Amino acid sequence: MGHTFSTISRSIRSDGFASAARMCLKELCQRRRFLLLLRRLGADDLPSNPQHDVRMANPADLGKIVAAWPDEFGGANRNGYVRRKIAARFDAGCACLISEKDGRINGAVWCMPWKMQYDPQCLASYNDAFEICNLFVALECRGRGIGRHLLGGALSLMAGSGKRSAYSRVLPERQSSLALHLDCGFALHGVLHCSTVLGYEHNRFVPVTRVRHTDIRGTGMRACILLAQGAWGGTLEAIRSLGSRGVPVYVFVFDRDPKPYASSRYCRHADRLVGDDASSVCRELIDWCKAQTFHQRPLLVPMTDVLSTFVAETRASLDKYFIVSAPRPESVLSLLDKGQANSLAAGCGLEIPRSAIVKSRVDLKATAGTMTYPAIAKPVRRREGGSADFKTLRLTSSESLQAQLGPVLDSSGGVLVQEYIEGCDDSVETMMFYRDRCGRLWGCTARKLRQSPPNAGIMASGHAIDIPDLRRLCTSLLDHIDYHGFGGTEFKRSGDKLVYIETNARPEAIHGLARKAGLDLVWIGYCDYCLGGLTEEPYPHREAFYLDWAAFWNAFDGKRGMLQYAVNLLQMLCRRPLKIAVFELRDRGPTMYLVRTDLAARIHRFLRKVMDKAANGEPARHL
């Protein structure tokens, strides 16, 4: 407080009463929000030949710097507070680089000591970090690369003096400065909330992976394109996760109705893909991107297995126009091929069920005679056109295997038949994950409570809980195949061991559970691809529950279990924290559209049934 009074007193003497009054109000109560960026310095940042217009400033340049000081930094008071502040920096020995031409300063940047309290997660010591401060370029000189030269010169200068970490605080509305920092290797580290109350400064740091939509309001974000089908829950969660933080989200839907996505308040535009194969979808996306006015390549995220396959097959063409968030094409294609996925898992030392690939009638007959029953059948690769359209079939005998798979083989590239691992729905354990570009695994482990259909289907309800051995096995598999990107892996617990089931190379449809558990994987992936990378270490998730009420109720089989299902549904609705699939209070549009569409379809079917019975002359009591 004494410092505040002395500063105001000095301002009254030097700058006049009006300036002192403005400073008094500023010191009494002020709140500001900064984007905090971080860059680790390495051998590539060591000093090189400086730009001919960039040089170190000295106290003799004080007058020129004050004259060039921009108004957005408080340049209106050039002869008072600003002059004293810059003179104090020279007296303290802080380095300043300036860009000068014909005796005029076109830009400048300061290298200041770093205040450690700004970043609670900072691992560097005080002497290893510094701050890029007051980087500016004169208005008439912008667009010439001066800012890049100044920033590069500051990094080289500090790396040569032994610094290892560079921080920079940028106002959210200064989008050009943010883009420059990201292009120069900085990563968005988090959001810094600074407030001054009665002369005392208070700071609150929010890591970038946990920021709320209000934390980064006004920041220009790179656009994101989601490729979807009918996985309403997972795609809507991605739309809400990104769109609520200011990311322009566009959705393209393959062979489905795009209106549920277009109903979301966070979706900029949703449209249907006309193409029916990988090449036509790729061409359609590229033509659309060319017609837009994006300043940066948008992020492309496939949300289903079919579209992940399409992207993998056309990756070379898409990379020219998009930042593709999918793993390497060979990883995608091998994991979506159930036979290859099992081989990869076995090579990693994981327990896998006994299985066989059936590609012909001869293979089918041989497998039927040697397989242990009950057994599970899955398409080798699920994709549109020339392949099976089912996800899982449960086979109880040799006869049922031949009867159900025989017709499928005529239009399929192959079917994986494997023994069924005994266990109820809650024996299935899954991990939703994102493995970043540095090889660190961000994952949410969960246990299924109920599936739809029972024992072989999607998660109708689940429980996010820490499962250490599942995390260890998943990490081992991903490290073994050097996987990077979104995905989800599934195991089934049999006694004291976990048996590998499958791995998906896309964001999971049950991403809402991980988001509710405090691990927003889609946003984490966006930060890695579009905001310079991830500067913090992966953290654990908290406990949460998930309910897909429609799938939960569809799992009901027969009127005898209806009461028990109703009781279980009520129990799930009472659990906290609970995430209900598709529904979100702040974004009710998609839910209302789907409910309205479902009711209209049911009423239409009922009326059609009534009209058919009336046409056949059946009495009304039979309706």
Image (tube, rainbow, N blue to C red):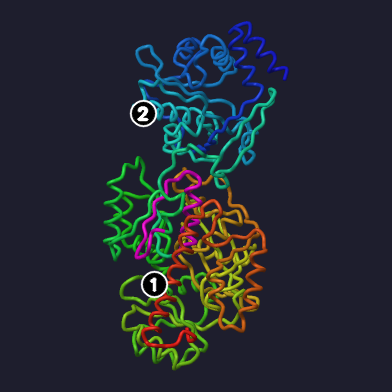
Question: Is-magenta flag for residue 72?
Answer: no
Residue 125 falls in which quadrant of the image? top right
User: Which mark, residue 382?
Assistant: 1
Q: Position of residue 623 (x, y in %)?
A: 47, 83
Side of 42 relative to 389 (left or right): right
Query: Compared with residue 442, is residue 81 higher up or lower down, i.e. above or below?
Result: above
Tell me what residue is drawn at x 28 percent, y 62 percent: 275
Three-letter residue code for mark 1: Arg
Determine the image quadrant of residue 514.
bottom right
In the picture, the disc for residue 453 is: none
| Disc 2 and disc 1 in contact, CB within 8 angstroms | no
Q: Identify the residue under disc 2.
A: 145
Residue at far right of view: 2
Could you tell me which quadrant the N terminus lies in? top right
| Residue 153, picture quadrant | top left
| Residue 242 visible in the snapshot | yes
User: Tag 2: Cα neighbours inside 10 Å, few (<14), some, or many (≥20)?
Assistant: few
Please state the horizontal and vertical placement of residue 314, each as a whole percent of the image. Answer: 31, 59
* Image coordinates for residue 133, horizontal then vertical, percent: 52, 26
Secondary structure at numbered mark 1: loop
Q: Which residues are magenta?
A: 231-259
